[in-house]
Amino acid sequence: MNGRAVLAWVGGIPLTLLGLLLLVGAPPVGIVVVLVGLYVLPPVNRRIEVDIAPSWAAAWVAGALLFLFALVIAHLVPIAAAVAVVGGIVALPPVRRQVTGRTRLKLRRSVVVGVVLLAAVGASATAALALQTDETLGHETVVHDVGERFTVDGEDSDLALTVEAVNRTYSLERPDAVVVGAPEEVYLVVTLRIENVGDEHVTFQDGSLTAMSEDGQRSYEMHEDTNEIRERGPYRAPGLELSPTTSGPRLDAGESITRTVAFQVESGRTYLLTVPEAGPYSGADHHYVPLGAV
């Protein structure tokens, strides 16, 4: 096996696997990547004769990927989509010919390559920065008081939440227990009303609700003993049943419940309740309820 064949195998296998993964989240891009990966593999390449110049094929692939990227990201980051469209126009040979024919502007191959590369890097970097900081995505940060009802638009469900009470304790079993000294960890116990205002049923895992520090440096999922909380003392409702899978206890559309959840957090910080299922790609607002300082 010569060096060229080795490079073909080394490049073709990862490309094919990447394409198969992309088929799940971005089918149009996945199809293109799978086809390119399969074509690079020697067994396929030997059986398929395609009389296409490599530069022409690269231009089509780059242009198609840039346009697909623009379609995916347009509703989230319009600026990144616009940059990708410019690169796609310059990359795709038929589109480039139309543009140069109307403007009488001739572009050298080196200029075309440079513009396409700059567009790809610029679009991806702009999108990554915007997604990381939630800018230009339509997100708003909304802070609610205890007792205020608010609706969270999730990726698969819509929930109306009302935090009814917040308690701090060093023991879930003995909420009134007094501890000498300052323990490193305490429990924030939150009683809330949950209404399923969407059309689909909802199940609750430990990450369905999160307590995060005000500075964003700490984040805690619901404690596993949330299921064991009993309706007594300061707790106004029993613990929320957490499902280990999506087939466990659920809240059907139109139903509502009042439950208590617990977070084991560190001392010396101020915490907020949030619903992380409203992910960065959902376009939903970020909702927070102050839980107080610990």
Image (tube, rainbow, N blue to C red):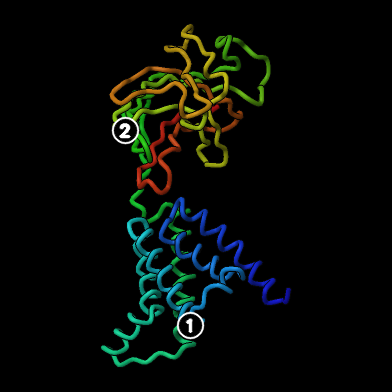
Q: Residue at x 35, y 83 (%)?
A: 96
Marks 2 and 1 sit apart, C-alpha to C-alpha, by 57 Å
Q: Residue at x 36, y 39 (%)?
A: 142
**Label 2 amino acid?**
Thr
- Relative to residue 18, is residue 243 depicted above or below? above
Which is in the foreground here, disc 2 or disc 1?
Answer: 1
Q: Residue at x 45, y 18 (%)?
A: 260
Q: Is residue 158 left or right of residue 188?
A: left
| Residue 290 x %, y % | 44, 31
Q: Report which residue position mark 2 lands on.
A: 151
Query: SS at mark 1?
Result: loop
Q: In which quadrant is the C terminus drawn? A: top right
- Outermost left residue: 102
- Outermost top residue: 232
| Residue 253 x %, y % | 30, 26
**Label 1 amino acid?**
Asp
Q: Report which residue position mark 1 lands on.
A: 51
| Residue 89 x %, y % | 35, 77
Query: SS at mark 2?
Result: strand
Dot 1, how many residues are within 10 Å of its Cα: few (below 14), some (14-19), or many (20+)?
few
N-term mark: 2 or 1:
1
Q: Is residue 139 left or right of residue 57?
A: left
Q: Residue at x 38, y 43 (%)?
A: 141
Quadrant assignment, res 87:
bottom left
- Relative to residue 225, is residue 21 depicted above or below? below
Q: In which quadrant is the N terminus drawn? A: bottom right
Query: Which of the two residues, 57 or 108, is positioned nearer the viewer here?
Result: 57
